[in-house]
Image: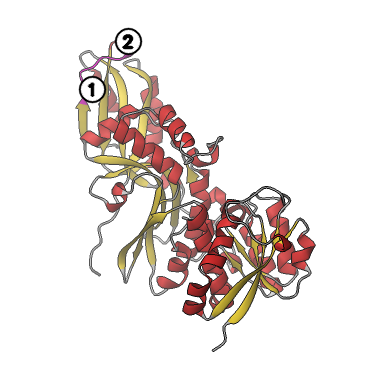
Amino acid sequence: MKPRTVKIGMVGYGTVGTGVARILVENADEITARTGLKLELACVVDKDMETPREFQIPRVLLTDKLETLLNNPDIEVGLELVGGTTIAKDIQIQMLKAGKHVVTANKALLAEHGPHLYQAALKAGRCIGFEASCCGGIPIVSILRSGLAANRISGLYGIFNGTCNYILTNMAGSGIPFAEALKEAQSRGFAETDPTLDISGTDTAHKLAILGGLAYHCRIDMDDIYIEGIENIDLADIRSALEMGYVLKLLAIGEKTADGRISLRVHPSFISQHTPLARVDGPFNAVSVFGNAVGNTMYYGRGAGMMATASAVVADIIDIATGSNPRLFETMPMATETRHPAQFKPIEDIDSRFYLRIMAKDEAGVFARYGQTLGKHRISIRGAIQHEWTGPDNTVPVVITTHPTPQKNMTAALTELEQLNVIHGKPVCIRIVDIPEDKEQ
């Protein structure tokens, strides 16, 4: 049977766009053999038409005019690969109005303006493919949308940001402080010159907004997600936790609680060193998903980079051309669901175990003072370690782990602990996350 030709227009000939062009050319025969499709790059729009790329396309395909793509009736799929949340939004809207399906890797745009774009796509009778927006080459969007469609998802735990994972892995493995680990990540190309979006947890939250919406069949706004980054992590706490069998990761967590509410949060988390996610090192990503039928499934791979992200873009083109993506998009709750804010559980109501490090004066009766403060707020101590080295003002570091307690109780206790004259500085508080065991249903 003769393969069906699918013409593609691409906006943005940067890193990912170059990777897409390479895959479409170098893997063309493989794609056709697997899918019965001939994917043809018909037009590439970029304001920079002179800079040589790592993979060159015929000059005739290059243009700096978006209208060349929009006015070509043979182009079925438009790729938006420019990034950002302003011009990229306009480009997607124009492509949809011109009758093109859209594929994007733009997580920030979908997290912040997704509902508007999804509605525009539905109105135009088209769809938006966004596999490349989350976790690079890991096909987690497809997994949540169709691969696990027979399941109710109770938990989603992920390492979504390779920059943060590289920094934390390096701090633990090499014993270097945060600033040095960040500098090394930048020198190796794992961190941007301005790493704020990554280390603040915002990039991870963008991905959680998208994946959480798929997992829990709802629309998620960024305000629904609690976000805390890794910029204040101290090497001393990573070392102390390692002694107790914990590894520090920046986790994205989505949980559906027993009362039906959804908890969404991004924060540094100590997890058991025996947990599979604890063994995800360097710039890699991983996602652990719990379904009521399948149990725990885990997905691992490169979360960013030219070819990993380009692979996901091409996968979306194929899903659109075969009709799979448009059919699933029509019923996507992220686009059609009416907001019900009460469904979301705020961080203050979440129960968690906690790691505390306080610099306490090395004198009699101090343990009773901070122990009394914790007890007042119904926080039960699970374990405590006091090291012998001396800190400022004749203080010693005391590390405490707690039994599960509501965040609001811990917040109140921390406020009081800061006021005690037997404690120097602010206590360090990091959540301990107990990822559920996979038990047969």
Q: Residue 104 got which mark?
A: none
Viewer-proximal residue among 119 and 257? 119
In the image, residue 348 lies in the stretch drawn in magenta: no
In this rendering, the answer to whether 432 lies above or below 338 is: above
Which amino acid type is marked by label 2?
Answer: Asp
Viewer-proximal residue among 242 and 279? 279
Classify 10 Å Cα crowding around label 1: few (below 14), some (14-19), many (20 and above): some
Residue at 54% across, 41% down: 197
Quadrant in the picture for residue 154: bottom left
Is residue 204 visible in the rendered image? The answer is yes
Q: Quadrant of the C terminus?
A: bottom left
Q: Secondary structure at mark 1?
A: helix
Viewer-proximal residue among 92 and 360? 92
Residue 382 position, x and y percent, is 21, 37
Classify 10 Å Cα crowding around label 2: few (below 14), some (14-19), many (20 and above): few
Q: Which of the colour schemes (rainbow, by chain, secondary structure, one colour) is used? A: secondary structure
Residue 365 position, x and y percent, is 22, 17
Q: Main secondary structure of the magenta part?
A: loop
What residue occupies the far top of the structure in this picture?
393
What residue occupies the far bottom of the structure in this picture?
1
On screen, residue 144 versus residue 438, left or right, reads right
Viewer-proximal residue among 371 and 376? 371
In this rendering, the answer to whether 353 lies above or below 150 is: above
Is residue 322 visible in the rendered image? The answer is no
- Residue annotated with mark 1: 367
In this rendering, the answer to whether 412 lies above or below 322 is: above
Q: Residue 393 got which mark?
A: 2
Q: How many marks?
A: 2
Q: Are marks 2 and 1 in contact (CB under 8 Å)?
A: no
On screen, residue 213 versus residue 93, left or right, reads left
Magenta span: 386-393
